[in-house]
Image (cartoon, grey):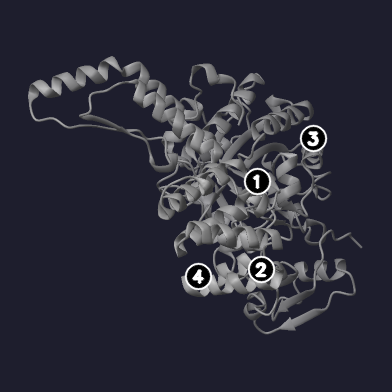
């Protein structure tokens, strides 16, 4: 397809998806290779309107942060792996958006993984839940207990007490402290 | 004729202000090529020019000289019961700024009135200040002119800083803070501030300066200017705000502090403040539209409980803690505070509950270096 044909196809898809005009403009403002690459992927994964909007926003931000083109982002191994993976279109479309978020917010994702690993390592009873703030938007850890008896309460509190050091480490990590070995981590 | 460092498309003088000392100084100082319009009501000229490609940017090139009809003195608009505030009082002698930082909150705050406004009756603010100190004998206040405008950006043509310094130098319980990103200090040299005038600079890493701080002086030039005013008898302070947590930021900001401390002894720094980049959704949208090529606006930010996008908390706090630690290592007890952060974050960074705003304000206003907000 030449550039005009790509643009015509993009307009058709935008019309079918009722993509808001501002987002269509953003798509058409990309370089030719990027416009075409996104069109191909949107077709392959059957991206819905909301997913297209998210993808456009995330791709633009990644391209700006890393000073590369959208086509180069879409050509990355982790994106290709998602696009070519077996499974349903909707599942792959969701995985595609998640992969873009991972690239867009790499340190957030890494920190969330570390914190979740720390929580898992506590091996707390399943009636204790330790919940991280959404998107680590605060430094507050929510710990809740589900109990039906005094005896059960005693056991859960004892379990929490045994995990005090680990919980303290998680709270410290949420406050910008370093988790032991990673003390030299650079921002 | 004084040299004007920023371009103007036009000057509008409101009826009743043409004979003011401020208007006379400005007319004398601007290039003859800048048209001067006399208008009955300057409000129309202050509005955004919607036919311009960048109405806010165009507003910055129109200067208005008018009377301020509302009080000059107010509490800092960034203050909120959610935050541990610094007790800063704002003296609004101008509105908007000829520099153009991509992250600036004025893009949203002044979206409906983007013209650069100067108030011909600025001397009326002195009466408000005298009433303030009379109303609270024994209390000290830190008053700044750098909230809705840069304190010194147009000082070469307005000369307002000289009158401010003379006024504050004569009042024991007032400290003036001139906050700037310029190196426009010519009018300050040769005056005697008597310890009652602070000149403060917002300091950013070179990467942020190059990417986001359009038409400002370079960080090195700001530090050199700080050294010069320190030698001229002024107190100095530094705002690391906004801190932007781009990859490599920690290393760059530590280098910046090293450069600062090589030029300004730690014990001579009256205080420092820090604040992470924060943007309402509206500001973020405006900033990204106006500065679509600035990667600093695409950080790892998430929507926080105060409705602003901020760098996710552990990363933001790590940057605060690193900078605070670097200053601690400098060996001087430099008072420090965080801007627009809750008390809990303050405690995480400094290990102490912050004092109430009025107390911090008084401490920062104090002339001795023994003062500490920590």
The part of the image, by quadrant, that contains residue B195 is top right
Which chain letter matches label 2? B
Q: Nearer the viewer, mark 2 or mark 4?
A: 4
Tag in front: 4 or 3: 4
**Depicted A143 relative to depicted B74: above or below:** above
**The one of A82 and B3 positioned closer to us in this rendering:** A82
In the image: residue B357, left or right of residue B206: left
Q: Identify the residue at image location x=61%, y=52%.
A: A61
Within 10 Å of the Cα at label 4, are there few (<14), some (14-19), or many (20+) other Cα atoms? Answer: some
Q: Using the image, name the chain to which the residue with label 1 belongs.
A: B
SS class of the residue under badge 4? loop
Q: CA distance from mark 4 to mark 1?
A: 50 Å
Query: Within 10 angstroms of label 1, few (less than 14), some, or many (20 or more) residues?
Result: many
Distance between mark 4 and mark 3 Cα atoms: 55 Å
Q: Give the residue number, with chain letter if any, for mark 2.
A: B56
Q: Which residue is mark 4?
A: A19
Q: Position of residue B255 (x, y in %)?
A: 73, 29
Of badges 2 and 3, nearer the viewer stands: 2
Disc 4, disc 1: CB below 8 Å?
Answer: no
Q: Are marks 4 and 1 on the same chain?
A: no
Kindly report the distance in space between the C-alpha atoms of the residues bearing marks 2 and 3.
34 Å
Which residue reaches farthest right? B1
Dot 1 corresponds to which residue? B177
Query: Percent from the top left, x then y, of residue B350?
Result: 50, 27
Q: Can you tell which mark lies on residue B227?
A: 3
**Labels 2 and 4 in the same subunit:** no
Q: Say which label, 1 or 2, has the lower sequence index.
A: 2
Seen from this angle, which residue lies furthest bottom?
A: B40
Question: Residue sitting at 64 percent across and 31 percent down?
Answer: B250
């Amino acid at each position: 397809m030449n550039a005009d044909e790509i643009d015509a196809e993009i307009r058709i898809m935008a019309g079918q998806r009722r993509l808001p005009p501002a987002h269509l403009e953003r798509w058409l403002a990309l370089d030719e290779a990027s416009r075409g690459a996104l069109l191909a992927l949107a077709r392959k994964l059957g991206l819905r309107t909301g997913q297209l909007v998210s993808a456009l926003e995330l791709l633009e931000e990644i391209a700006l942060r890393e000073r590369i083109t959208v086509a180069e982002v879409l050509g990355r191994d982790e994106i290709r792996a998602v696009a070519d993976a077996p499974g349903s279109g909707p599942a792959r479309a969701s995985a595609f958006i998640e992969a873009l978020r991972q690239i867009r917010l790499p340190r957030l994702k890494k920190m969330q993984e570390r914190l979740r690993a720390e929580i898992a390592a506590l091996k707390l009873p399943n009636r204790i839940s330790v919940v991280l703030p959404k998107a680590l938007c605060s430094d507050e850890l929510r710990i809740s207990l589900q109990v039906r008896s005094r005896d059960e309460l005693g056991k859960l509190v004892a379990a929490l007490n045994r995990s005090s050091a680990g919980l303290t480490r998680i709270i410290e990590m949420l406050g910008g402290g370093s988790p032991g070995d990673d003390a030299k981590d650079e921002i | 004729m004084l040299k004007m460092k920023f371009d103007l498309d036009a000057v509008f003088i409101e009826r009743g202000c043409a004979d003011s000392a401020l208007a006379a100084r400005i007319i004398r100082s601007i290039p003859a090529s800048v048209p001067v319009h006399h208008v009955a009501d300057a409000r129309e000229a202050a509005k955004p020019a919607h036919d311009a490609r960048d109405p806010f940017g165009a507003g910055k090139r129109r200067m208005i000289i008018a009377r301020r009809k509302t009080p000059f003195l107010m509490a800092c608009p960034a203050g909120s019961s959610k935050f541990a505030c610094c007790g800063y009082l704002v003296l609004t002698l101008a509105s908007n700024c000829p520099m153009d930082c991509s992250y600036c909150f004025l893009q949203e705050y002044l979206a409906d009135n983007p013209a650069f406004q100067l108030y011909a009756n600025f001397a009326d603010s002195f009466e408000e200040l005298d009433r303030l100190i009379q109303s609270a004998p024994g209390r000290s206040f830190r008053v700044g002119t750098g909230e809705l405008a840069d304190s010194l950006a147009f000082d070469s043509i307005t000369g307002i800083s000289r009158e401010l310094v003379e006024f504050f130098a004569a009042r024991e319980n007032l400290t003036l803070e001139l906050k700037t990103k310029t190196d426009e200090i010519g009018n300050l040299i040769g005056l005697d501030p008597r310890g009652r005038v602070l000149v403060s600079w917002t300091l950013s890493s070179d990467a942020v300066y190059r990417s986001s701080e359009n038409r400002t002086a370079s960080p090195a030039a700001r530090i050199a200017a700080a050294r010069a005013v320190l030698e001229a008898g002024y107190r100095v302070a530094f705002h690391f705000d906004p801190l932007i947590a781009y990859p490599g930021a920690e290393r760059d900001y530590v280098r910046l502090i090293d450069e600062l401390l090589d030029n300004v002894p730690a014990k001579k720094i009256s205080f420092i403040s820090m604040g992470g980049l924060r943007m309402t959704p509206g500001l973020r949208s405006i900033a990204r539209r106006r500065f679509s090529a600035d990667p600093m606006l695409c950080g790892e930010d998430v929507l926080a409980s105060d409705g602003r996008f901020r760098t996710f908390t552990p990363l933001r706090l790590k940057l605060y803690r690193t900078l605070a630690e670097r200053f601690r290592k400098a060996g001087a007890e430099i008072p420090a505070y965080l801007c627009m952060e809750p008390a809990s974050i303050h405690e995480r960074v400094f290990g102490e509950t912050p004092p109430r705003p009025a107390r911090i304000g008084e401490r920062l206003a104090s002339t001795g270096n023994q003062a500490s907000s920590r």
